[in-house]
Image (tube, rainbow, N blue to C red):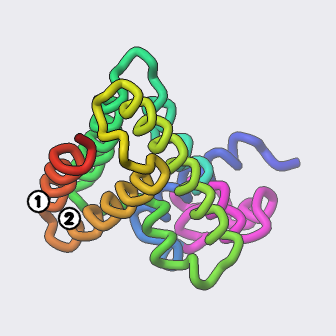
Amino acid sequence: MARPSMRKEIVEAALEQFHARGFNAAGVKDITDRAGVPKGSFYNHFESKEALAIVALEEYGLTRRLQDLADPGVEPLTRIRRHFEFFRDEILGYGITRGCLLGNFGAEIADHNEAIRGAVRAGFEAWGTALASAIREAQQAGAVRADLDPEATARFILSAWEGALLLARTDRSAGAFDTFFAVTFGTLLV
């Protein structure tokens, strides 16, 4: 019988390997070595590396602090800013060598694997929904222009964020984050 903790160890190792190296560069053996489990045990828990990637994406989504965007104890615009500040600080903590796993997978393999593309899309949809809700609350509080469509604005902000991540990684500089914050919170969400 498969050991449940072993499955968790494999998922955690996969999340780390996928985030650090990408889907294609992270082999099953790399993942099982990092998890400290025999390679053969991988298939007791997962049908394929693609199936593991989908679970890893779901697990990654749980770490994205979407619930913070709905915290009624914090003003909506402050929630949104803190949300992206957390991600910026996380990326800076990695030395600007990692991006968002959703964006990474979207760029690397979404064109080649329909199941993973669907998981990436679902992750972005959940994020966009949470962000749009916070934008709508900020509008109701009078902190954000009422003429903005919350859903379209959320998608735009997510696109801008993913682009900022790409530029920051390319430049190995936080300059793209500075631009993201200046335009998002100084021009768009006013």
Extreme-bottom residue of the structure? 112
Residue contact between numbered discs 1 and 2, judged by CB atoms under 8 Å = yes
Does 172 appear in magenta?
no
Within 10 Å of disc 1 (Cα), the crowding (few <14, some 14-19, many 20+) is: few
Q: Measuring 11% from the left and 59% from the top, which residue is drawn there?
A: 175
Residue 165 seen in the current view: yes
What's the magenta region? 27-56
Count up the numbered dots: 2
Q: Is residue 37 magenta?
A: yes
Question: Residue 113, image x and y in percent?
Answer: 65, 79
Examine the rendering and report whether any part of residue 36 can be seen.
no
Q: Is residue 165 left or right of residue 177?
A: right
Q: Which residue is mark 1?
A: 175
Q: Earlier in the sequence, mark 1 or mark 2?
A: 2
Residue furthest to the front: 147
Please tell me which residue lies in front, 58 or 34.
Answer: 58
Name the element at disc 1: helix
SS class of the residue under badge 2? helix
Q: Is residue 16 above or below residue 139?
A: below
Residue 168 badge: 2
Residue found 17% across the figure and 61% down from its top? 176
Say what amino acid the circle numbered 2 marks: Ala
The amino acid type, in three-letter code, at marker 1 is Gly
Decide: is 158 above or below 112: above
Alpha carbon of mark 1 to alpha carbon of mark 2: how far?
7 Å
Residue 31 lies, in percent from the top left, at 56, 63
Nearest the eye: 43 or 64: 64
Please give left or right for residue 181 compared with residue 51 in the image: left
Rendering quarter of residue 112: bottom right
